[in-house]
Amino acid sequence: MKVGAVIITMGNRPEELRALLDSVAKQDGDRVEVVVVGNGSPVTGVPEGVRTVELPENLGIPGGRNAGIEAFGPGGAEVDILLFLDDDGLLAHHDTAELCRRAFAADPKLGIISFRIADPATGETARRHVPRLRAADPMRSSRVTTFLGGANAVRTKVFAEVGGLPDEFFYAHEETDLAWRALDAGWMIDYRSDMVLYHPTTAPSRHAVYHRMVARNRVWLARRNLPAPLVPVYLGVWLLLTLARRPSVPALKAWFGGFKEGWTTSAGPRRPMRWRTVWRLTRLGRPPVI
């Protein structure tokens, strides 16, 4: 199976990017083709043979990754598997691409694999980086209902069937939007603890737009994908969880601003999942109300 990799960058981590590219080049088996997408920035200093795409403006994470997908032909059709890797990450082992080939070849319904993210200094995996509710043991691999955006592999047939990431999200929850559409189409998602991306432990709230985007996109996610009766339940649960976490007053103000924006702006096309998909999500341990 042919493997490609999509890396988006804003040009502010040249040393980390080069280290990541070196770790991709060292993968066992056939060569992994790589495209680096400059998201509103030029791409410089990459090795010969690495494809580059320079976008004239920052299109956000999903927009940048979609541009990388199309660099491999419509829907990434030139390859069978695409790795999506954060530009400040590093593949920990040489066999990650080969493990992906084996996993996808062994399970025709496997559409997406979420890697384990580990801090390079401590080797520890943060709870929020395990994409399931029962996240106490990050070393346990399992079926899951979503995946980590900067450390994953996707079978390109998924994009051909359900489309790419939602450009309009810009940042936050774009992975779950794709995951829900893939699950509704019959694909499965695995979390694999043996496929590791080293990445420094950072707080997502370091991004200035974090609270607004998280709230707005949560509303969009529900409006686009959930059966109508579940939309208020899902968003009500998340409202209560947000208040229980006691964010600061500025953070809460930004969150409510984003929540309002999610209701008053277009969420894009609405394609509610089937009730059997709701049941599948429930059986997998995460009903789409939380």
Image (tube, helix red, strand yellow):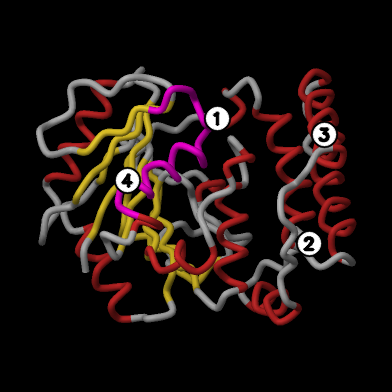
Residue 20 vs 153, above or below: the answer is: above
**Image quarter hosting the C terminus:** bottom right
Segment colored magenta: 55-73
Disc 4 marks which residue?
A: 71
Pointer 2 or 1: first along the chain: 1
Residue 119 x, y percent position in the rendering: 37, 38
Task: State if disc 3 and disc 4 touch (CB < 8 Å).
Answer: no
Between marks 2 and 3 in the image, the one whose residue lies nearer the viewer:
3
The answer to whether one can see residue 139 in this image is: yes
The quadrant in which residue 131 appears is: bottom right
State the SS at label 4: loop
Disc on res. 203: 1
- Mark 3 crowdedness (10 Å alpha carbons): few <14, some 14-19, many ≥20: some
State the SS at label 2: loop
Between marks 4 and 1 in the image, the one whose residue lies nearer the viewer:
4
- Judge whether residue 274 is colored magenta: no
Q: Which amino acid does label 4 sit on?
A: Ala
Q: What residue type is labelled 3?
A: Glu
> Residue sitting at 81 percent across and 38 percent down?
265
Residue 200 vs 279, above or below: the answer is: above
State the SS at label 3: helix
Residue 287 x, y percent position in the rendering: 72, 68
